[in-house]
Amino acid sequence: MRIDIITLLPRLLESPFSHSILKRAQEKGLVDVVVHDLRDFATNKQKQLDDYAFGGGAGMVMMIEPIDLCISKLKSERDYDEVIYMTPDGELLKQGIANELSLKGNLIILCGHYKGVDQRVRDHFITREISIGDYVLSGGELAAAVLADSIIRILPGVLSDETSALTDSFQDDLLAPPVYTRPSDYKGMKVPEVLLSGHEAKIEEWRYEKSVELTKQKRPGLLGE
Ligand code: 6GU
């Protein structure tokens, strides 16, 4: 899989992809994350990327031409399954969207800034608009990193234990059960006995019950109640 991220602030996206699971996924060749600096596609002398909104009002609008040039160049090199625009008024990111996008080959993710992009970009180049939650961030970069992380970590071969993404919270619309590690007794705070029993079926049953209990308590909406 290949993910091309288009941004005004490429340095904001360096760190998230340079550590741990996302770094290893790239080293293993399971995903290629390529960050593009929109400034490289500016066409005028001042390297201008944004301009005043027609009709007035506060806030600058990202211009169509540099974005068109960048997307067109990428599309001339390979086919893309989706051209995604990160925006607070997009479709709310859920595990199901991450699962769906993880099955694609090539994705472009465009990060918005200021008052957003010229509407013609959204009308003509964007195939999907995604938000990561009902709050406003200063730009789409952190949201793009969240989206890419949610996609990459479930690609086959990324997690060493192949099944572990399947036992995540949300993967089956249940929250994950609590986990414990050594010591089994820390200052009198004990690990539930069943986890030390070695009885696999009982442990599975306990985990499932805890998942349902936690989900009822914290996120009853997930159970469709
Ligand atoms: Cl995708 N972008 C911005 N700027 N703010 C957000 C968001 C995206 N998702 C939630 N808030």
Image (cartoon, grey):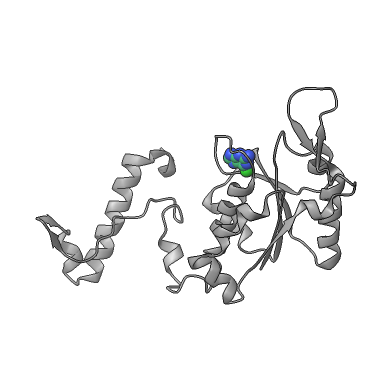
Left/right of residue 48 with respect to residue 4 in the rendered view: right
Q: Farthest front residue?
A: 46
Q: Residue at x 22, y 65 (%)?
A: 202
Q: Is residue 80 above or below residue 30?
A: above
- Looking at the picture, tell me which residue is in the foreground, 99 or 51: 51
Percent x, y for residue 14? 60, 59
User: Does residue 33 appear to the left or right of 203 in the view shown?
Assistant: right
Q: Is residue 203 above or below residue 131?
A: below
> Residue at 49% of width from left, 67% of height from top?
21
> Which quadrant of the rendered structure holds the N terminus?
bottom right
Give the position of the C terminus as an image quadrant.
top left
Choose top left, top right, bottom left or bottom right for residue 121.
top right
Q: Position of residue 18 (x, y in %)?
A: 55, 65
Front position in the image: 166 or 225: 166
Indicate the position of residue 171 as horizontal and vertical percent values: 46, 56
The residue furthest bottom is: 28
For residue 69, say whether it is visible.
Answer: yes
Could you tell me which residue is drawn at 69 percent across and 40 percent down? 113
Residue 23 falls in which quadrant of the image?
bottom right
Point out the residue furthest to the right here. 44
